[in-house]
């Protein structure tokens, strides 16, 4: 799908910076703000870190991007997709999306806590195939 249409479908103003952010996310999958800033500096040398945060926050508000909170590391951002979870390499920090059925875990948590659970976030740590060998 065209990046312009994707942004417009989420009621986001189309700017060169936002188009580049979307392109970088398509290429990288997951990225933190510092790495995004470095990637954007070549094309937009006057772009400030504050402007990047402003764009990221707006894109998250419109559910175009999702924030992935990784314990003990900087949060990363990804294009919003269907619900999924993440595995991260403890050595090289590679991140991979994984589809998991956590219905049993959610049912147990509801039963034990009496909470009405409306959101879940799972990040599993280990070693990726490259780092294992």
Image (cartoon, rainbow, N blue to C red):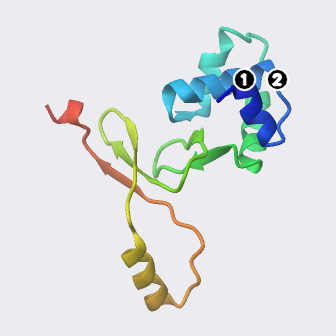
x 40%, y 39%: residue: 95
- Give me the disc on residue 19: 1
In the drawing, does residue 37 fall left or right of residue 26? right
- Estimate how packed mark 1 is, as few (under 14), some (14 to 19) or many (20 or more) residues with alpha carbons within 10 Å: some
Does 83 sit left or right of 124 as displayed?
right
Locate the C terminus by quadrant.
Answer: top left
The image shows residue 80 at horizontal and vertical percentages of 61, 46
Q: CB under 8 Å between callouts 1 and 2?
A: yes
Is label 2 in a helix, a strand or a loop?
Answer: loop
Can residue 24 be seen here? The reply is: yes
Residue 100 in the image: x percent, y percent? 38, 60
Q: Going by the picture, which residue comes out furthest to the front? A: 1
Residue located beneath label 2 in the image: 15
Dividing the picture into quadrants, the one containing residue 32 is top right
Residue 53: quadrant of the picture = top right
Question: In the image, residue 83 lies at what x, y percent?
Answer: 52, 56
Name the spot of residue 12 as percent of width and height, x first: 82, 37
Give the residue at x 86% y 32%.
13
In which quadrant of the rendered image does the N terminus lie? Answer: top right
Q: Residue 2 or 60: which is nearer the viewer?
A: 2
Q: Measuring 40% from the left and 84% from the top, which residue is drawn there? A: 108
**Above or below — where is 35 with respect to 59?**
above
Which corner quadrant of the image does residue 46 belong to?
top right
């Amino acid at each position: 799908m065209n990046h312009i249409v994707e942004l417009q479908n989420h009621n986001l103003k189309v700017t060169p910076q936002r188009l580049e952010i979307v392109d970088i996310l398509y290429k990288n999958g997951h990225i933190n703000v510092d790495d995004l800033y470095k990637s954007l500096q070549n094309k937009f040398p006057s772009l400030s870190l504050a402007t990047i945060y402003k764009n990221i926050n707006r894109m998250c508000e419109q559910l175009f991007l999702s924030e992935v909170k990784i314990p003990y590391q900087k949060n990363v951002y990804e294009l919003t997709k269907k619900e999924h979870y993440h595995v991260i390499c403890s050595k090289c920090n590679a991140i991979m999306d994984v589809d998991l059925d956590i219905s049993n875990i959610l049912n147990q948590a509801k039963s034990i806590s009496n909470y009405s659970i409306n959101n879940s976030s799972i990040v599993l740590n280990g070693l990726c195939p490259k780092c294992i060998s």
